[in-house]
Image (tube, rainbow, N blue to C red):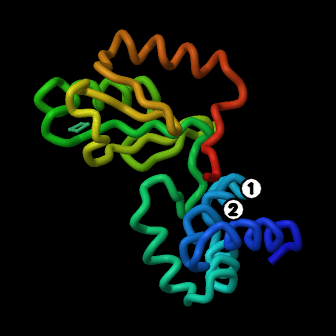
Amino acid sequence: MTPERLARGHELVARYPRPQSALVPFLQYCQEQDGYVTLQAMRDAAELVGITPGEVESIASFYTLLFKAPAGKHIVQVCRTLSCMLRGAEDLQAYIKRRLGIGHLETSADGQYYYEEVECLAACDRAPCLQHNLEYHYDVTPASFDKLLDSWQASAPAPAMPAE
Ligand code: FES
């Protein structure tokens, strides 16, 4: 583990009564550094909080915002659960995939966009909705997605995924 990563890990561990509670924030920090959660980051996390790398991997796989492979700078996650599907999410998903030129769990060739269909984002009353990095967008239509895409393309770099 690099000295910088170790120092950050100790800072995070000190915030919680149990070291294991720092696991996800530490993995988020590593993801910010590396672009995704690398195998080395999982080994570092295991060493930091005192569990096995296998346990780290199984916990990390539970969280959709922890990526085990390089993902795009813009993480676009569209809800695929009932309320959103009843309000047009399927057509919206098809539209977004066409616009981005990628499918579910894919990253665009230029590394800019990653697309994923996810379970309920807990904004069912504003369906259909999507999440761009950690920002929610509600009542999304193809036309409003076009505007979002224009704004994302105009903003560089993409909004960061906060480590905590
Ligand atoms: S069903 Fe889409 S946010 Fe709940």
Q: In this view, does 46 lie above or below 108?
A: below
Residue at x 42%, y 49% (from the top left corner): 105
Q: In this view, does 107 lie to the left or right of 137?
A: right
SS at badge 2: helix
> Dot 2, crowdedness within 10 Å: few (<14), some or many (≥20)?
many
Residue at x 66%, y 67% (from the top left corner): 15
The answer to which of 54 and 51 lies nearer the viewer is 51
Kind of residue indicated by mark 1 = Gln
The percent coordinates of residue 27 (x first, y second) are: 61, 65
The percent coordinates of residue 64 (x first, y second) are: 42, 55
Residue position for label 2: 30
Give the alpha-carbon distance from disc 1 to disc 2, as whole Å: 5 Å
Q: In which quarter of the image is residue 112?
A: top right
Give the quadrant of the N terminus: bottom right
Kind of residue indicated by mark 2 = Cys
Residue position for label 1: 33
Which residue is outermost to the front?
17
The percent coordinates of residue 123 (x first, y second) are: 28, 34
